[in-house]
Image (tube, helix red, strand yellow):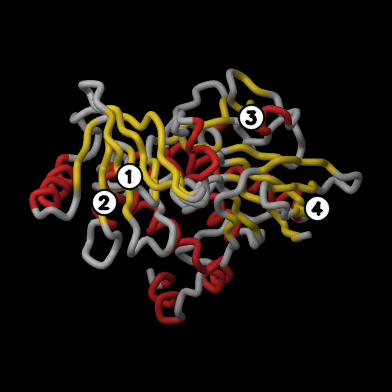
Amino acid sequence: MIFTDALVIGAGPVGLYQVFQLGLLEIKCHVIDALPYPGGQCIELYPDKPIYDIPGMVRTTGRELTASLLAQIKPFDAPFHMSQTVNQIEKLPDGRFQVAISSGQQFNTKVIMIAAGVGAFQPKLLQVASLQKFEKSQLFYHRQAPQGVTESRVVVVGGDDAAFECAIELATPGKAASVTLLHRRDVYQATPELVARAHALRDANALQLMVGQITGCDENAGLLSAVQVTGTSGQIHHVPTEILLVCLGLSPKLGPMADWGLAMDRKQLAVDTERFATSIPGIFAVGDINTYPGKKKLILSGFHECALAAFGAADVVYPGKKPQLEYTTSSSRLHKLLNVSSKESQASSTP
């Protein structure tokens, strides 16, 4: 059992900023996310596409924004539990919550901050029944390749940025023995830059581009040895395969959250706009997962919600002790929390 002040569900930009706002109020937290890495849909859906509406940033990307937010929360040393979903939440007689996640780990927490975006992202599965038994041994989802593929023949399925990035990385000399990037048609959703790099690798015989769909597989001694690819003309090709990486995108699912007893409106959590509290005291919701009159699904709106939710959480974590509003430009307490040097602190207090 892990005891903590707060549990943040969701490690997208809003969830990461929630960690920062909690940290300023000295509320310790753990972070849970269904993806294997922080960044949420910013990393998964548009890691390198420009974002222009983050305050103070003329231009950034999902990858850059995530890196900045992770650097910002580093002083608070919040533990992350990735590739995990929350299976059960139980409110205890003392007002705390007991939370179980998919790994079996359990938490005892004073407050829960839900920053789950539009739900937990789950990979879109390859609908080939004969391949299911190879999942997690030779069949993998998401962009992360397993260890030890140096001597393996790899097939990557997909046509978006994630699929191209994965295939290009594995086509680097010293990585996989061979790499085939398979997509159902020769029109891709990846950026032109990634497509151009893949074409260059193809011309150098480091990567094979193939059009078609997997309709079956071949086995040898109980192991996946090849995938059967049906081309656009109906011809079946047997492509030697030892590792199959599927990058068909993600789909958000509320999952068990729909059964937690929280008031919802069209699959979103109803909250007030004073503290962004849900219908269950001690549970707060920020970002795209919540709804209220005038709600705008913008990252900057989620950041605003995090600040007020943190103060709402402080009322629960530190009952009877009203948190004071302090400014990072002048508060010595905040400077200490943020590891600001004495020289920087003196400079910030100079008129």
Q: Is residue 12 left or right of residue 19?
A: left
Label 2: few (<14), some or many (≥20) within 10 Å? many
Q: Quadrant of the C terminus?
A: bottom left
**Type of residue at label 2?**
Val
Labels 3 and 4: the sequence-earlier one: 3
Q: Distance of mark 1 from mark 3, alpha carbons?
A: 42 Å
Camera-side residue of 33 and 171 = 171
Horizontal placement of 148 versus 322: left or right? Answer: left
Q: Nearer the viewer, mark 3 or mark 4?
A: 3
Asked whether the viewer can see residue 108, the reply is yes
For mark 1, does the 10 Å Cα neighbourhood hold few (<14), some (14 to 19), or many (20 or more) residues?
A: many
Residue 308: x percent and y percent? 59, 43
Q: Amino acid at mark 4?
A: Gly
Residue 99 against residue 254 in the figure, above or below: below
Q: Are marks 1 and 4 in contact (CB under 8 Å)?
A: no
Mark seen at residue 156: 1
The local secondary structure at tag 2 comes to strand
Q: Determine the CA span between mark 1 and mark 2.
A: 7 Å
Q: Residues within 10 Å of mark 4 (few under 14, many from 20)?
A: few
Label located before the other in sequence (2 or 3): 2
State the CA–CA distance, disc 2 to disc 4. 61 Å
> Disc 2, disc 4: CB below 8 Å?
no
The percent position of residue 73, horizontal first and vertical second, equals 50, 61
Q: Are marks 1 and 2 in contact (CB under 8 Å)?
A: yes
Disc 2 to disc 3, C-alpha distance: 48 Å
Tell me the residue that label 4 is attached to: 320
Q: Earlier in the sequence, mark 1 or mark 3?
A: 1
Q: Position of residue 197 (x, y in %)?
A: 14, 50
Q: Which residue is mark 3?
A: 271
Residue at image mark 2: 179
